[in-house]
Amino acid sequence: MDANFNDVLAGNGRYADRFIDEQLEGRAARGLAVVTCMDSRIEPLQMLGLAKGDAKILRNAGARVTDDVLRTLVLAVALLGVQRVLVVPHTDCGMSKRSDEQVQQAVREVTGMDARSIDFATVQDQRAALERDVQRLRSWPFLPKGLPTAGAVYDVHTGRLEVVVP
């Protein structure tokens, strides 16, 4: 493999040397799915006082409820024990600091490619976007009616959640 990955492969070796198979199932033991951002400051399980195996964690830029998130949640509910969904964007998010046009320009500068065909789902009003995303979950016909869903914003500077959509 490419030498660019030597550090993470070495880290995996150390991890595997200490690894203990806890015989966990692939189901969400606490019946929870969390949609959150890919920001590396977020540790979803720790943030919610959960342990490995407790929840399904779905991460993307901005914690948005995209078509792929919906597809994954349908599978998680139908096959993997998910009975509730929490959407958790965060403060100081890069997706709320830039417009789609600014992201497209950055992609153009890095790749030389025109990325106008990609919807990057940047967020000008994080709370309004969170409300729309939770409503999208609640109204998705392939998820059970009445599936408990909520939205909260995680503060990356305090570690606290603020419930925005109960």
Image: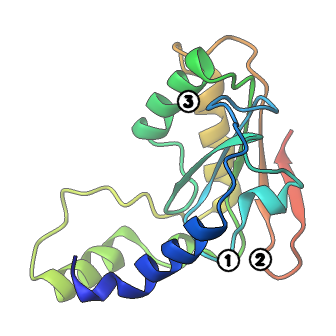
Residue type beneath disc 1: Arg
Residue 33 image point, x, y percent: 68, 38
For numbered disc 3, what is the local secondary structure?
helix
- For disc 3, the neighbor class at 10 Å (few under 14, some 14 to 19, many from 20) is many
Who comes first in sequence, dot 1 or dot 2?
1
Residue type beneath disc 2: Val
Residue 155 image point, x, y percent: 81, 72
Q: How far is mark 3 from mark 2, CA to CA?
A: 25 Å
The answer to whether 60 is drawn above or below residue 75 in the figure is below
Q: Which residue is mark 1?
A: 41
Q: Which residue is mark 2?
A: 156
Q: Residue at point 51% right, 70% down?
A: 95
Seen from the viewer's position, the closer of residues 55 and 150 is: 55
Residue 120 in the figure: left or right of residue 164: left
For numbered disc 1, what is the local secondary structure?
loop
Q: Which residue is mark 3?
A: 73
The answer to whether 118 is drawn above or below residue 35 in the figure is below
Image quarter where the C terminus lies is top right
Question: Does residue 136 appear anywhere in the picture?
Answer: yes
